[in-house]
Amino acid sequence: FIPQALALYDRGYTMILPDQYGQGFSGGGRGDFAVELFVQNVIDVAHWARDRYSGPLAMGGGSLGSAVTYLAAAGGAPVAALILHNLYDFGPHGDALNLSRFAPLRHVPGAQAVMRTMIGLGAQIAPRLRIPFRLLGDFSTMVDTPGFYDVWRTDPVPIKAVTLRYMRSLFNSPAAIPFEANRLPALVINPVRDQMTSPEVTWDNYQRLGGPKAYVALERGHWSVDEATAQLWADHADAFLQEHLKQDQRQLAAG
């Protein structure tokens, strides 16, 4: 998220990028976390930003962070607008299956419920059992910058496995305010050349979303770190925030 954050910083925004629990730098065992811990972390950061800075506060997140951002806003983060790169739902009938290697099963009646039950039982028995990322999804298409996957795969810093309790939380983290009841201005950016997760997931959730909203179909893969994409992304975000945040001082907390 750093290229996008720097691009918005250059446009006059104050940027806050929190480190998440369980990543190895902010407490917790590496890979041992849950969606609700991510959400509470973002809510806490938003309140910290609200106390420290004047002016309206917006919040953004991408991929998994799109769901975390919406959950945090629905859970009480004091924000005035949302920038969502992707839009995912981690409720019982949400998108956990859609984001995995088992996405082709999403059209099979009951598949989500069966997977949720199996993971839930496993998490009861061994909540901290770690499952390698590669068994859960195809991360070779996570970033569409050539050569990035090989760098990420061999980098010792990013986590490469997650616990069953985290996987369980992906199936059991509904928003306090459903998409349909949302009232916050929200920009949804959908990378329509995404090969990691079907762009239809974000599009379907965007259609459910209530409140003032805007949609951008970005001709990119799941995520991009090149400068041109960062500038294009920031242009869309800035235009939306300029429209919906009327005051001169603009603060952005990126989740």
Image (cartoon, rainbow, N blue to C red):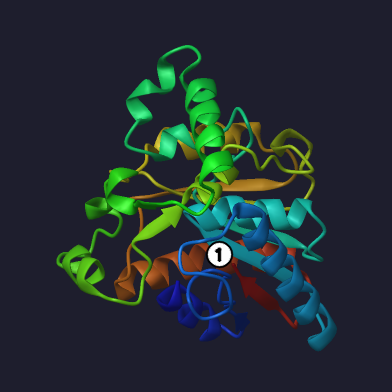
Q: Is residue 252 above or below residue 216?
A: below
Residue 147 located left or right of residue 127:
left
Q: Position of residue 147 (x, y in %)?
A: 15, 67
Give the left or right position of residue 86, taking residue 224 as reference: right
Q: Quadrant of residue 195?
A: top left
Q: Is residue 132 left or right of residue 249?
A: left
Picture residue at 71% right of the left edge, 78% below the top: 250
Which residue is rendered at x = 53% and y = 78% of the image?
A: 8
Residue wearing tag 1: 237
**Residue 95 visible in image:** no
Q: How many marks?
A: 1
> Which residue is most to the front?
125
Residue pictured at 64% horizontal, 57% vertical: 69
Label 1 sits on a secondary structure element that is: helix
Q: Nearer the viewer, residue 46 or 232?
A: 46
Point out residue 191 in the picture as x, y percentages from the top left corner. Answer: 39, 49
Nearest the eye: 48 or 201: 48
**Who is closer to the viewer here, 69 or 239?**
69
